[in-house]
Image (cartoon, grey):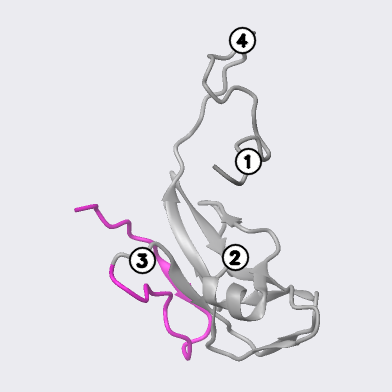
Amino acid sequence: MLQAVTVPVKKFDDTLEMPAYAYVGDAGLDLRAAEDAVLKPFERRMVSCGIAMAIPQGYAGFVLPRSGLAAKHGISIVNAPGLIDSNYRGEIKAILINLDSQTPFEIKHGDRIAQLVIMQTPPVDLVEVDELSQTDRGIGGFGSSGIGQ
């Protein structure tokens, strides 16, 4: 079994639930809105989540869209994934966008609006080289594998 990572959380709004997993085995903790808002079609807005956290060094937080909001309402995150560095101590906010061309989306205080995944992020030492090792894929990218079989 994996060892849990302890992340201290400061709540700015005692009426909000702490971020939590909806089901055992989930990777994303649900983030909730600390404010009411309406997103007009194609409008983007930073929505407060009412918390700050002290992510341990060697880890980072990634704010991701909720699949149900994306599928049912066209709600996504502009900078998906949003990155929370381990040295950031400010309030967590989700930069939401309404990609529905016709229907405004209403956010109510306490709604689950995004997911937070905490992942290990080891330091990386970049080494300049003249050549890279060869792979089957090589430089193929951006659709190089096609959409059919």
Q: Which residue is mark 1?
A: 146
Let me know if residue 16 is in the magenta part.
yes
The percent coordinates of residue 91 (x first, y second) are 59, 70
Instruction: Compare marks 1 and 4 and give the one earlier in the sequence.
Output: 4
Q: Which residue is painted at 46% across and 42% down in the image?
A: 121
Q: In the rendered picture of this protein, how many numbered marks are placed on residues?
A: 4
Q: Which residue is mark 2?
A: 90
The percent coordinates of residue 62 (x first, y second) are 53, 57
The percent coordinates of residue 132 (x first, y second) are 58, 14
Q: Which residue is mark 3?
A: 26
Cα separation, mark 2 vs mark 3, equals: 25 Å
**Tags 2 and 1 touching, CB below 8 Å:** no
Main structural element of the magenta stretch: helix, strand or loop? loop
Cα separation, mark 2 vs mark 1, equals: 42 Å
Cα separation, mark 3 vs mark 1, equals: 31 Å
Cα separation, mark 3 vs mark 4, equals: 40 Å
Residue extent of the magenta highlight: 1-24
